[in-house]
Image (cartoon, coloured by chain):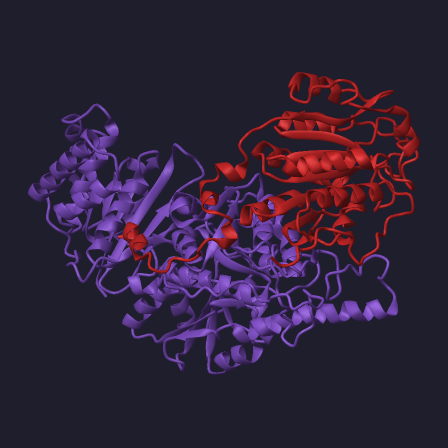
């Protein structure tokens, strides 16, 4: 037996986030979850789009694909289907995932692709210096909405439940311990695991701050929530105000896309033979 | 070259395409090179559709201009197509549907009234069976043996068995015998020659080429005229071990393909201009992250939704310029299914070798129409080298290492010790971003320039790898046609006609339309006397590209943007005009 291959740790690149950014808690949670599960770093792929939070793959020692805005999930799906032996984690922000990329969000959940999607939801566009995001609350005054947002925000948890995600959780970057549990649970879960993380922007969002969330969050597991109950999960997903639930909303078992795709039953696609050598009879259909 | 052409016309839903394809297949099984042209509209029922099966003892490269037999399922088909019939031609119709007298037809063309509905009623109340009587009569006049027609019809029903097949065989035999009694075989009928040919569409050839080149993953969103690539791949997915994903949109399709390629499988997506417009940003991402991907762009008439079922070559500018910034790409432009197979294989090899997106430019005319190929023109035994370009040596791995030819050692996720980040932001050799805290600092300004130059060196490699323009015909001919893509087919047929008239021409084509090697292009044009650009677009996009890249100016143009493919007679007429009067 050789030495075990290293698990995911920090990379040599230091995070470029603002001091105090919620995303530090998220990268810590992902790192801790991967360490706990002992998955070798070369078998992990972190996939992101564009935004402050989408820089996350650079800060860990796994493989990464830092693509373009809103498209992390289809890249992540392609990676899974090419090699379903890999642990694939999508990371990004609320603009990336619920704005420009919301179509992919919905479709990857209905497919139940076996990957984990961690969003750093700060209810604002940070990297573009403070415009409203799809999760900004009504009335939120931003550079693009000087008189306040006049659109109802997207509820990512409810959207995930409606779209068929089989693991739906909300974390808080102020509680790395719980977040680690939620991410680790998502990675272990067979199917699409969604972890929306309340991850405050300390520079551009003066409403949804760490204090704002600390005063409001409560843990679902402490409230006796049963994550196997979809109706109760729905009810909890609608709570947003004085009390905001964090923890596991819903978990269920459903065959994954990779299990249902017959071609993948022969093993990871990247390891299957390619080409048509010796398959001359294939041409007979054209006669 | 002797030829015969059978045309079938009617409304969408009448089964015109399947009649036409069956006749084309009879000819290809007779060992004759055949072209099958399917003209249809963007409706599922109604409208006017037609199919022309054209066979020859040489090789037809287009639908041709004329027909010898017209099977008209409605009167409109007679009005539209009778003028295209050659002397000695026959119009097959059912008098119960509409009467037709030979006096209604052009001189030398006669009507053959076949009781197709009456024949059908012998077997069933389903009126669609009338087609069987009609195809039987057409086959007789077309010189197709009845047993061959029966084999083709039986095969077209696939695993379906029982009375439907029996009815079709019975009714087609009745139609055949009716024609035997009431008409004679066309004087243009051809004898069988040699073993059966393979009859395939451009899209089938592209899909086959992709599979042969080792494609393991196709993601696509339905869009005419690219959809049948996905259909062929999906039908063969399990047997060939290729994952086929219908994505939620073209954005997802290309990103899935890029993701799969990043993770170690050869991947492709295919679309038409509208979908390709959505893929543009991702194309640049593949360029920036140096991820191989093959993108098939099957053009149709634009702009916008345009004419969804009609052809055009209007997207060359789009393919050349797709994506912000600059990155290496190549555009391969097949003209015929045999080239479509080879170009797709080549596209995968180039994508893999140069780690950059490669485009295969098709169009509706190539993608959806049928042509015959010989087995040795689609060699399935393609060498597929391993993707893994590097193994960990314990030292720090640089995914984007500066190299002489710009190609850096590639690792695949799952390989220990080679972890890297593929970044769509500008990055250094290790893949670390230089777009944020480093950008603008002198050392990183220089780094950006070096990385840009590293990537663009691959374009020089692609120039060297590109085959030179191909010249068909005598180099010193007084007229050189200049073309790319499916338009080449009609020019070849026009050249044969011009040769027959004693007018020598040649044809200069671009199997790789981009990048071009200016020196090699200029040397090809050095001997050209007068040039005639033939392109299926409004502005002469290839002409502009040639001028921009090589300084070559083409003297004459024949441009078409009415949705229809070129017909040989249009090219002949223009060539004669240019050669006689010096053009305009």
- Nearer to us in this view, B568 or A124: A124
- Is the residue B355 above or below the residue B69 in the image? below
Q: Is residue B71 visible?
A: yes
Which chain is in purple here? B
* Chain in red (letter): A
Q: Is residue B434 left or right of residue B454?
A: right
Toward the viewer: B492 or A220?
A220
Q: Residue at x 73, y 46 (%)?
A: A35
User: In this rendering, does residue A94 appear at all?
Assistant: no
Q: Determine whether A194 is above or below A54 in the image.
A: above
Quadrant containing the N terminus of chain B in the rendered view: bottom left
Residue positioned most to the front: A1
Question: B463 or A272: nearer the eye?
Answer: A272
Q: Position of residue B151 (x, y in %)?
A: 18, 45
Q: Is residue B480 left or right of residue B80?
A: right
Residue B225, compared with residue B126, is above or below; it is below
Q: Quadrant of residue B449?
A: bottom right
Residue at 87%, 45% (x, y): give it.
A129
Residue B284 at x, y percent in the picture? 66, 57
In the rendered image, residue B179, in percent from the top left (x then y), is placed at 11, 42
Residue B513: % across, % down: 52, 66
Q: How many marks?
A: 0
């Amino acid at each position: 037996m050789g030495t075990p291959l290293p698990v995911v740790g920090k990379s040599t690149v230091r995070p470029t986030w603002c001091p105090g950014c919620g995303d530090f808690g998220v990268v810590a949670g992902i790192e801790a979850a991967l360490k706990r599960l002992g998955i070798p770093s070369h078998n992990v792929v972190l996939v992101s789009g564009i935004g402050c939070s989408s820089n996350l793959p650079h800060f860990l020692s796994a493989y990464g694909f830092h693509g373009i805005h809103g498209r992390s999930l289809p890249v992540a799906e392609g990676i899974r289907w090419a090699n379903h032996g890999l642990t694939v984690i999508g990371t990004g922000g609320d603009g990336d995932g619920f704005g420009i990329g919301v179509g992919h969000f919905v479709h990857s959940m209905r497919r139940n692709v076996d990957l984990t999607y961690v969003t750093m939801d700060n209810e604002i566009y940070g990297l573009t210096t403070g415009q409203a995001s799809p999760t900004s609350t009504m009335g939120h005054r931003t550079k693009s909405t000087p008189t306040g947002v006049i659109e109802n925000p997207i509820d990512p948890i409810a959207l995930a439940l409606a779209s068929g995600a089989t693991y739906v959780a909300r974390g808080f970057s102020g509680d790395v311990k719980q977040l680690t549990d939620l991410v680790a649970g998502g990675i272990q879960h067979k199917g699409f695991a969604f972890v929306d993380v309340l991850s405050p922007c300390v520079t551009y969002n003066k409403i949804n701050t760490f204090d704002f969330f600390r005063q409001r969050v409560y843990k679902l597991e402490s409230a006796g929530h049963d994550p196997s109950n979809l109706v109760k999960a729905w009810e909890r997903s609608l709570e947003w105000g004085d009390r905001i639930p964090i923890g596991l909303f819903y978990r269920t078992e459903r065959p994954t896309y990779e299990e249902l795709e017959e071609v993948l039953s022969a093993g990871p696609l990247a390891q299957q033979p390619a080409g048509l050598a010796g398959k001359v009879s294939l041409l007979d259909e054209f006669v | 070259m002797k030829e015969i052409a059978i045309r079938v016309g009617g409304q969408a839903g009448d089964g015109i395409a399947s009649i036409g394809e069956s006749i084309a297949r009879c000819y290809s099984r007779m060992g004759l090179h055949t072209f099958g042209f399917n003209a249809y509209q963007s409706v599922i029922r109604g409208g006017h559709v037609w199919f022309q099966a054209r066979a020859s003892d040489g090789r037809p490269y287009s639908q041709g201009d004329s027909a010898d037999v017209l099977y008209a399922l409605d009167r409109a088909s007679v009005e539209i197509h009778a003028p295209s019939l050659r002397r000695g031609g026959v119009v097959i119709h059912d008098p119960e549907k509409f009467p037709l007298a030979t006096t209604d037809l052009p001189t030398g063309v006669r009507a053959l009234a076949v009781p197709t509905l009456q024949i059908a009623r012998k077997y069933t109340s389903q009126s669609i069976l009338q087609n069987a009587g009609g195809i039987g009569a057409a086959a007789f006049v077309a010189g197709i043996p009845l047993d061959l027609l029966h084999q083709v019809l039986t095969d077209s029903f696939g695993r379906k068995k029982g009375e439907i097949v029996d009815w079709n065989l019975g009714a087609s035999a009745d139609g055949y015998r009716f024609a035997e009694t009431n008409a004679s075989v066309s004087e243009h009928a051809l004898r069988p020659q040699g073993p059966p040919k393979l009859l395939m569409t451009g899209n089938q050839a592209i899909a086959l080429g992709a599979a042969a080149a080792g494609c393991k993953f196709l993601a696509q969103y339905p869009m005419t005229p690219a959809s049948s690539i996905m259909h062929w791949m999906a039908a063969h997915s399990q047997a060939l071990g290729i994952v086929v994903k219908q994505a939620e949109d073209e954005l997802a399709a290309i990103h899935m393909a890029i993701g799969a390629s990043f993770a170690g499988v050869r991947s492709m997506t295919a679309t038409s201009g509208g979908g390709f417009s959505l893929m543009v940003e991702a194309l640049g991402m593949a360029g920036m992250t140096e991820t191989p991907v093959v993108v098939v762009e099957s053009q149709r008439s634009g702009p916008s939704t345009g004419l969804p079922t009609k052809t055009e070559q209007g997207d060359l500018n789009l393919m050349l310029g797709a994506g912000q910034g600059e990155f290496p790409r190549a555009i391969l432009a097949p003209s015929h299914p045999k080239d479509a197979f080879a170009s797709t294989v080549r596209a995968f090899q180039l994508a893999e070798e140069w780690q950059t997106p490669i485009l295969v430019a098709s169009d509706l005319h190539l993608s959806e129409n049928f042509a015959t190929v010989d087995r040795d023109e689609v060699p399935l035994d393609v060498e597929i080298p391993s993707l893994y370009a590097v193994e960990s040596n314990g030292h720090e791995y640089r995914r984007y290492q500066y190299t002489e030819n710009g190609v850096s050692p590639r690792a695949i996720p799952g390989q220990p010790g080679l972890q890297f980040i593929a970044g769509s932001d500008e990055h250094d050799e290790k893949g670390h971003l230089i777009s944020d805290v480093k950008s603008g600092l002198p050392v990183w300004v220089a780094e950006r320039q070096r990385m840009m130059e590293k990537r663009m060196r691959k374009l020089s490699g692609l120039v060297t790898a590109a085959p030179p323009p191909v010249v068909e015909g005598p180099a010193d001919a007084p007229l050189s046609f200049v073309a790319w893509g499916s338009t080449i087919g009609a020019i070849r047929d026009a050249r044969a006609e011009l040769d027959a008239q004693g007018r020598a021409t040649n044809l200069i084509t671009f199997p790789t339309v981009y990048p071009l090697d200016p020196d090699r292009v200029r040397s090809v044009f050095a001997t050209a006397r007068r040039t005639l650009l033939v392109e299926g677009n409004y502005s002469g996009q290839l002409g502009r590209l040639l001028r921009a890249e090589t300084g070559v100016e083409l003297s004459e143009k024949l441009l078409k943007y009415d949705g229809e493919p070129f017909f040989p007679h249009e090219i002949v007429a223009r060539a004669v005009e240019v050669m006689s009067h010096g053009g305009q």
